[in-house]
Amino acid sequence: MTEDAPELRASDADRERVAEVLRDALAEGRLDMEEFGERLDATYKARTYGELAPITRDLPSGPGGAPAPRISMTKEPAQSGSWAGRIVGGEGSSTWAVAIMSGFQRKGRWTVPRRFNCFAFWGGGEIDLREANFADGEVEINCIAIMGGMQVIVPPGVEVLVRGLGIMGGFDQREEGVPGDPGAPRVIVTGFAFWGGVGVERKLTRAERQRLKEERRQEKLDRKASLRELGESSRDEIHDSHRRMLEGHHDLMRDRSRERREERREERREERDRRRRREY
């Protein structure tokens, strides 16, 4: 954490790094579910580095007991969350993949080249771009699938164009035509499929799914708390109403009792007056 400038505003990426530390601690048994929920709620409510710092001060950053990471005030382009920061240039960390009666995967934090070639024969492959950087604003995934299949996974916000040819096979066109975010890269899927297929799917990252899950969980807890407060308020109102009704009944009974006593005293006075008149 940045200890020397606690008043600086934290970013979404800063909060997400802290949330990842909390998830690792939960998986390792360092936190129970109640502590995890409390700290995660504090993480997403935090606005400054000073509010984030105490949340992971007593936790390692992950397996192996490494110290918790410091949040840098210098934004890292690859992890900043902006599309401009993920278009990094260069040649790409991997330019091809082959699966012959087997499979391959390209996923996680890797750099997609301007053209990525992949071939599958009686096999399959997965090209996951959700956490990837991009060598250029427009990249091409060239897929050759012979009696096999491939799956291209893109994050929300990326524009997809599908230009592949299928013979007794096909290319998935469902994600084509979805507008991209400003500055987001464009992914062109090309190639050839014979007795095979190439699928294109749009998915959230695991961290984003977890964040949304926690938000839904927190909303559910908030709704339950609101209903509980409403129920307690309603019970209090009923009790107050019942108490007022009893107090009103008691007041009425006291008034009637007072009236009866007054009537009896008046009757006794009248009786004494009658006796006096008879005596005279």
Image: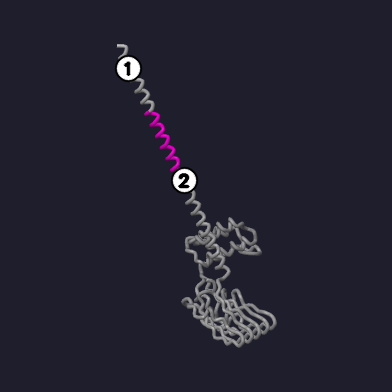
In the structure shown, which secondary structural element does the residue marked by tag 2 occupy? helix
| Region rendered in magenta | 239-259
In the structure shown, which secondary structural element does the residue marked by tag 1 occupy? helix
Amino acid on which disc 1 is placed: Arg
Position of residue 27 measured from the top left corner of the image (x, y, whole percent): 63, 62
Q: Is residue 240 magenta?
A: yes
Position of residue 242 measured from the top left corner of the image (x, y, whole percent): 45, 41
Q: Report which residue position mark 2 lands on.
A: 236
Residue in the image at 49% along x and 48% along y:
232
Nearer to me, 5 or 266: 266
Q: Which mark, residue 274?
A: 1
Amino acid on which disc 2 is placed: Asp
- Residue 70 appears in the figure: no
Nearer to me, 77 or 34: 34
Q: Is residue 221 magenta?
A: no
Is disc 2 surrounded by few (<14), some (14 to 19) or many (20+) residues within 10 Å? Answer: few
Label 2 to label 1, Cα distance in Å? 57 Å
Position of residue 75 measured from the top left corner of the image (x, y, whole percent): 51, 70
